[in-house]
């Protein structure tokens, strides 16, 4: 009998139980990884995309000419997405945005859904910032951002970033440790993503907002800014085989991570949301 998604996640989680985060160089054989050309198509900046390791890895870059991106050939309605990512290594990466996310904005231009990992560059030997976000039905005016520092340098080694998206719950993982859980509640209405989405990865110039609220811009004397992706998993699932519940150990690890590394959460931003958004009481805050 094939292992369930929960069993696979727990298998991976046990591998990280001694150390909170370890470089994610490979996945256990139970996960089926995809070759780049089979699973993805090039989105833009083709000259800045290089396929490596016989299609098992891809390198994308940002320079003064263009950024770069790719998207999945298929769409998914509830799935597990995962990739190992190594971010650009430079003393100055301000304004650079590297992403791993799902979206259907190409189909539903005014009512799109989105689940985001965004990596925001740093100025003057600083640290990368990780941001997650969730949109449903075009609810971009009700951003649900969280930002985190990371207990490792994501430009030194590959680390794994995963999204488990089910009909009722979305879980974001770093190296198979859950860092955020969003549970759908009735009051969210269409704000919870529910329509089929594609998986994307991009690198681009976000000078107007990414670092210090736009204070620090991309400096192309440090270009090219190169990011590498590997170990792609795009696995459709249904409620019967995607167990989105967390074990006590997983919740403890998440609590530990959040107590140390969350630097911003929309759920506790009383200036932005004097009345917290409805899912906040059920989220992992």
Image (cartoon, helix red, strand yellow):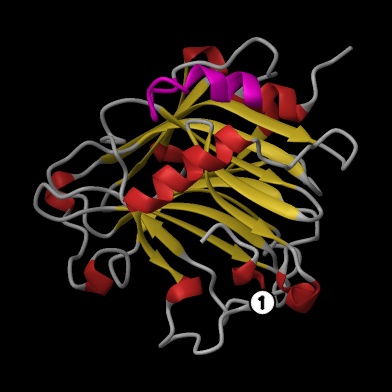
Please indicate whether residue 191 sits to the left or right of residue 77 in the image. left
Give me the residue at 62% from left, 70% from top: 281
Q: Which residues are magenta?
A: 10-24
Picture coordinates of residue 63, whole percent (x, y): 28, 48
Please indicate whether residue 124 sits to the left or right of residue 186 in the image. left
Report the front residue among 29 and 215: 29
In this view, which residue lies farthest toward the left?
Answer: 124
Picture coordinates of residue 207, whole percent (x, y): 28, 66
The answer to whether residue 44 shows anywhere in this view is no
Picture coordinates of residue 120, whole percent (x, y): 33, 55
For disc 1, the marked residue is 278
Q: Is residue 143 above or below residue 133?
A: below
Give me the residue at 56% from left, 17% from top: 27
Please indicate whether residue 21 sits to the left or right of residue 3 in the image. left
- Name the dominant secondary structure of the magenta segment: loop
Task: For mark 1, give the secondary structure.
Answer: helix
Q: Is residue 12 magenta?
A: yes
Report the front residue among 162 and 37: 162
Q: Residues within 10 Å of mark 1 (few under 14, many from 20)?
A: some
Q: Is residue 253 above or below residue 192?
A: above
Q: Is residue 189 above or below residue 3?
A: below
Dividing the image into 4 quarters, which one contains the N terminus?
top right
Give me the residue at 33% from left, 37% from top: 87
Please indicate whether residue 128 sits to the left or right of residue 280 in the image. left
Report the front residue among 242 and 140: 242
The answer to whether residue 175 shows anywhere in this view is yes
């Amino acid at each position: 009998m094939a292992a369930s998604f929960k069993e696979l996640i727990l298998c991976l989680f046990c591998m990280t139980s001694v150390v909170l985060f370890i470089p994610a160089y490979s996945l256990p054989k139970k996960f089926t990884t995809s070759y780049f050309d089979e699973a993805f198509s090039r989105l833009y900046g083709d000259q800045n995309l290089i396929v490596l390791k016989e299609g098992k890895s891809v390198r994308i870059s940002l320079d003064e000419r263009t950024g770069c991106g790719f998207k999945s050939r298929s769409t998914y309605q509830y799935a597990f997405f995962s990739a190992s990512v190594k971010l650009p290594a430079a003393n100055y990466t301000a304004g650079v945005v590297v992403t791993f996310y799902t979206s259907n904005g190409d189909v539903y231009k005014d009512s799109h859904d989105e689940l985001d990992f965004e990596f925001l560059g740093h100025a003057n030997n600083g640290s990368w910032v990780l941001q997650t976000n969730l949109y449903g039905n075009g609810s971009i005016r009700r951003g649900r951002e969280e930002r985190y520092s990371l207990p490792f340098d994501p430009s030194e080694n590959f680390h794994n970033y995963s999204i488990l998206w089910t009909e009722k719950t979305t879980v974001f993982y770093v190296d198979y440790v859950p860092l955020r859980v969003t549970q759908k509640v009735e009051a969210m209405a269409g704000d919870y993503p529910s329509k089929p989405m594609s998986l994307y990865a991009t690198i681009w110039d976000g000078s107007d907002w990414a670092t210090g609220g736009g204070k620090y811009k991309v400096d192309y004397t440090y270009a090219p800014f190169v990011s590498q992706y590997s170990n792609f998993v795009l696995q459709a699932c249904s409620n019967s085989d995607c167990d989105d519940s967390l074990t006590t150990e997983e919740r403890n690890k998440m609590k530990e991570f959040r107590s140390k590394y969350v630097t911003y959460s929309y759920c506790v931003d009383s200036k932005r949301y004097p009345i917290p958004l409805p899912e906040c009481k059920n989220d992992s805050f």
